[in-house]
Amino acid sequence: MILSELGKTIRDLRKQKGLSQENLAEQSGISRATLSKLENGYIANISIVTINQILSLLGYEIDIKPTNPFMT
């Protein structure tokens, strides 16, 4: 996944699960405003631990892969 798409993906997954921003933010231990910023692409001040927690609650995990699979 391209980092710039992360917020939109989280928003789409949250909506698929039927969760409000308030509900997911509360479960993740962050404010609704912080989750809103993440979903809108402002991720500079959000830790990878927080992103991992959000994805875990949505049933996903962080995966690392090469940017060019032919260069491995």
Image (tube, rainbow, N blue to C red):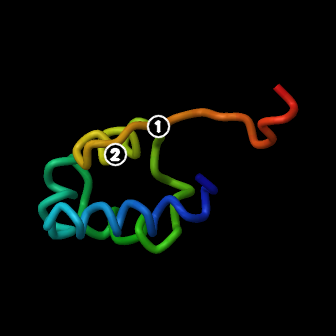
Closer to us: 36 or 3? 3
Kind of residue at disc 2: Leu
Residue name at image x 39 percent, y 37 percent? 61
Q: Position of residue 35 (x, y in %)?
A: 33, 63
Snapshot quadrant of residue 71 = top right
SS at mark 1 in the image: loop
Residue name at image x 24 percent, y 60 percent? 31
User: Height in image: 65 above or below 24?
Assistant: above
Assess disc 1: are there few (<14), some (14-19) or many (≥20) residues with their C-alpha within 10 Å of its C-alpha: few
Closer to us: 12 or 35? 12
Q: Position of residue 19 (x, y in %)?
A: 15, 65
Labels 1 and 2 touching (C-beta < 8 A)? yes
Residue name at image x 52 percent, y 35 percent? 63
Assess disc 2: are there few (<14), some (14-19) or many (≥20) residues with their C-alpha within 10 Å of its C-alpha: some
Snapshot quadrant of residue 21 = bottom left
Q: Position of residue 40 (x, y in %)?
A: 46, 74
The extreme top residue here reads 72
The numbered mark, 1 or 2, whose residue comes first in the sequence reads 2
User: Height in image: 12 above or below 62?
Assistant: below
| Total numbered circles | 2
Kind of residue at disc 1: Ile
SS at mark 2 in the image: helix
User: Height in image: 55 above or below 31?
Assistant: above
Mark 1 to mark 2: distance in Å? 8 Å
Snapshot quadrant of residue 8 = bottom left
Q: Which residue is mark 2?
A: 55
The extreme front residue here reads 70
Q: Which residue is mark 1?
A: 62
Left or right placement of residue 8 versus residue 17 in this view: right
**Quadrant of the rendering where the C terminus is positioned:** top right
